[in-house]
Image (spheres, coloured by chain):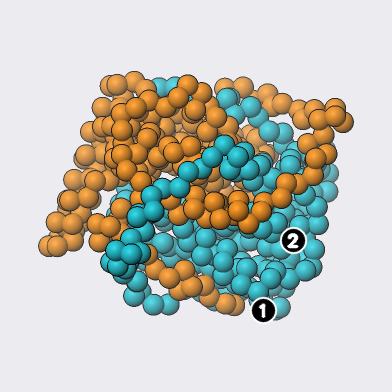
Chain colours: A orange, B cyan
């Protein structure tokens, strides 16, 4: 990958601020709230492929996320190889079986009944990494909080997720994996840290509430419960 | 804070899926792209207070972010006390002076010229924490990737940031701080981990390009440079 970045144009006719900031009216904000509410973690996908160019478009939007020092540390790994996908699925199943051992009684039965990944169906699989050694940004903002690099990548994942949902495309974030094993499977630079393994595709169904609420695993709290004052 | 969560209503008349998923049309998606492009890290604020209820509304939207196992591990600390704010500012200045020492020559001069936080002007300061010991979610999805808890909180921060921008409210994420010192200043549970210290308020100016690009610190790369295939 090139480290050569593109200088912004200095042509006055294309001055990015010339048109001024757009208005985001009440109708847009109502839709935006819908988008936040209907963005789900999708585990059940249809097999239909995405339209040509869709992933490039969504990843370009993801790259508009904030990043510490404008470091842009996100690395998007499209996992298309069948053998690699199969190996990822095997790792998920091992990690999931291991996680189940941590529960007992009703909670274990509930866990065993959950569908937690769409690895067998999703047409696109995307492993999102943080390049922990990127020179971009020249270290700004990372000295006391080096976790800002993977945090920037999470912001890109969330942006991608919202952009996808606005196109009716579902995303599921799979964290029940062993990052070391995924690194072996995908053969990536040692400095790259796995942030998110995403299944992407058209969802089987649409829901406004999380599957884990419907499955009675965990309810939503009142957001006011999370606010404290100092 | 209560651990009692609210059961979803079972009244058919308020079945959340009954109306069906909304359409997000091309006009909305164009606006959403504008929102991504105009969301900036704001360091220069006007002193105007936010309208009553604005923060409650924005935090309720933040709480719609994805979270591992629906754990909702975000904790929003509104820092209003003047002495505490002053102590945070002192810590920022110490961390910033220390960071400057890591640069030399032109790069040091450039760093010293950057405005990196709006701590003296922003009407609202919000420290966003991850409750690393929350029982919500029952550990689902965290066993091999415990960082999923703070990552979930980053998703809430990004959601908050977009919701704020849609109301013309700016957000700046300050990471040039010592988390241990901030923990002392804010007197919070030991299990809470600082994810983001945010300055919130109306921005002095609007820009479509990042300040760090305008200041020639770091340009934007072509997003296609970040895509690899496996």
Location of residue A83 (image quadrant): top left
User: Relative to the observer, which residue lies in front, B207 or A146?
Assistant: B207
Residue occupying the far right of the picture: A12
Compare marks 2 and 1 and give the one earlier in the sequence. 1
Q: Can residue B204 be seen in this view?
A: yes
Q: Where is residue B53 in the image (x, y as percent from the top left)?
A: 61, 72
Subunit ID for the residue under disc 2: B
Note whether B33 is above or below A23 in the view shown: above
* A110 sits to left or right of B41: left
User: Relative to the observer, which residue lies in front, A179 or A108?
Assistant: A108
Q: What residue is at 52 percent from the left and 72 percent from the top?
A: A227
Note whether B56 is above or below A38 in the view shown: below
What residue is disc 1 on? B81
- The tag on residue B202 is 2
The quarter of the image holding the N terminus of chain A is top right
Subunit ID for the residue under disc 1: B
Whether labels 2 and 1 belong to a single chain: the reply is yes
Q: What residue is at 39 percent from the left and 53 percent from the top?
A: B19
Helix or strand or loop: what does disc 1 sit on? Answer: loop
Helix or strand or loop: what does disc 2 sit on? Answer: loop
Note whether A227 is above or below A45 in the view shown: below
Q: Position of residue A190 (x, y in %)?
A: 45, 31
């Amino acid at each position: 990958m090139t480290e050569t970045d593109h200088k912004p144009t200095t042509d006055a006719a294309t001055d990015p601020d010339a048109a001024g900031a757009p208005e985001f009216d009440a109708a847009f904000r109502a839709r935006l709230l819908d988008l936040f509410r209907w963005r789900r973690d999708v585990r059940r996908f249809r097999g239909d492929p995405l339209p040509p160019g869709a992933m490039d478009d969504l990843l370009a939007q993801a790259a508009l996320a904030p990043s510490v020092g404008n470091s842009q540390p996100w690395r998007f790994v499209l996992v298309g190889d069948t053998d690699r996908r199969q190996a990822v699925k095997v790792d998920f199943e091992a990690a999931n079986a291991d996680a189940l051992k941590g529960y007992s009684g009703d909670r274990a039965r509930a866990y065993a009944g959950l569908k937690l990944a769409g690895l067998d169906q999703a047409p696109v699989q995307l492993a999102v990494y943080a390049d922990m050694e990127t020179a971009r940004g020249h270290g700004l903002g990372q000295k006391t909080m080096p976790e800002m690099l993977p945090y920037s990548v999470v912001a890109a994942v969330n942006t991608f997720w919202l952009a996808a949902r606005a196109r009716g495309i579902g995303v599921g974030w799979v964290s029940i994996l062993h990052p070391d094993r995924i690194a072996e499977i995908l053969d990536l630079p040692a400095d790259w840290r796995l942030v998110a393994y995403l299944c992407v595709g058209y969802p089987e169904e649409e829901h406004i509430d999380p599957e884990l609420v419907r499955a009675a695993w965990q309810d939503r709290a009142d957001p006011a419960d999370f606010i404290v004052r100092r």
